[in-house]
Amino acid sequence: TIVISGKKQGCHLITSDILKYITENISQIKIGTLNLFLQHTSASISLNENADPDVRTDMKLIASNLVPPSKQFAHDGEGSDDMPAHALSHIFGCSQTIPIQNGRLMLGTWQGIWLNEHRKFGGDRKIVATIMGSK
């Protein structure tokens, strides 16, 4: 399990955090997959642009327009950002599977792993990394 320290609301590039934990374990894998599973219901994990931080800023804006905070949600005991966070987690998803080839993640040139924090501040987030493959 990889623990990502708490982040403010937004889209955060975490590729280097993930690689820090898995590089040694995938180095001998000829062909396989890495599955990343986020153990939370108010954040999501995705693959997207790794070079231009404006893409992360724009995605935060798109997400907030897609599901804005509202006092009309029945589930509001944890604040006005909680139900929108659950909805966005449901839409964007809590897992990603990335191919491994010759000991390397087969991400595209401009792809990075994102943690999308949908709460104003969600606290630490846990990601279960499962590596499958042959040496």
Image: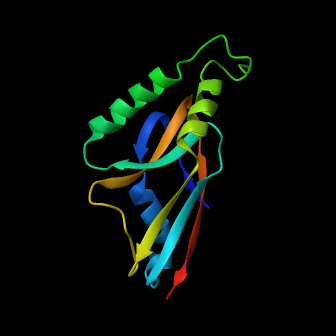
Q: Residue at x 65, y 25 (%)?
A: 83
Which of the 4 image quarters holds residue 112?
A: bottom left
Residue 126 position (above or below residue 80): below
Q: Position of residue 64 (x, y in %)?
A: 47, 24
Judge by depth and name the residue closer to the eye, 112 or 7.
Answer: 112
**Identity of the residue drawn at 45% across and 21% down:** 65
Q: Quadrant of residue 129?
A: bottom right
Q: Residue 91: give x, y in percent of width and height.
A: 56, 37
Q: How is the image coloured?
A: rainbow
- Residue at 35% of width from left, 37% of height from top? 56
- Name the foreground residue: 66 vs 16: 66
Indicate whether 112 appears above or below 92: below
- Looking at the image, residue 116 sits to the left or right of residue 61; the answer is right
Q: Is residue 63 above or below residue 13?
A: above
Question: Percent position (x, y) of residue 67?
Answer: 53, 23
Image side of residue 78 versus residue 103, left or right:
right
The residue lying toward the viewer, choosing from 43 and 90, is 90
The image shows residue 74 at horizontal and vertical percentages of 74, 17
Q: Residue 54 sits in which quadrant?
A: top left
Quadrant for the N terminus in the image: bottom right
Q: Residue furthest top?
A: 71
Residue occupying image coordinates x 43% and y 39%: 11
Count of numbered badges drawn on the protein: 0
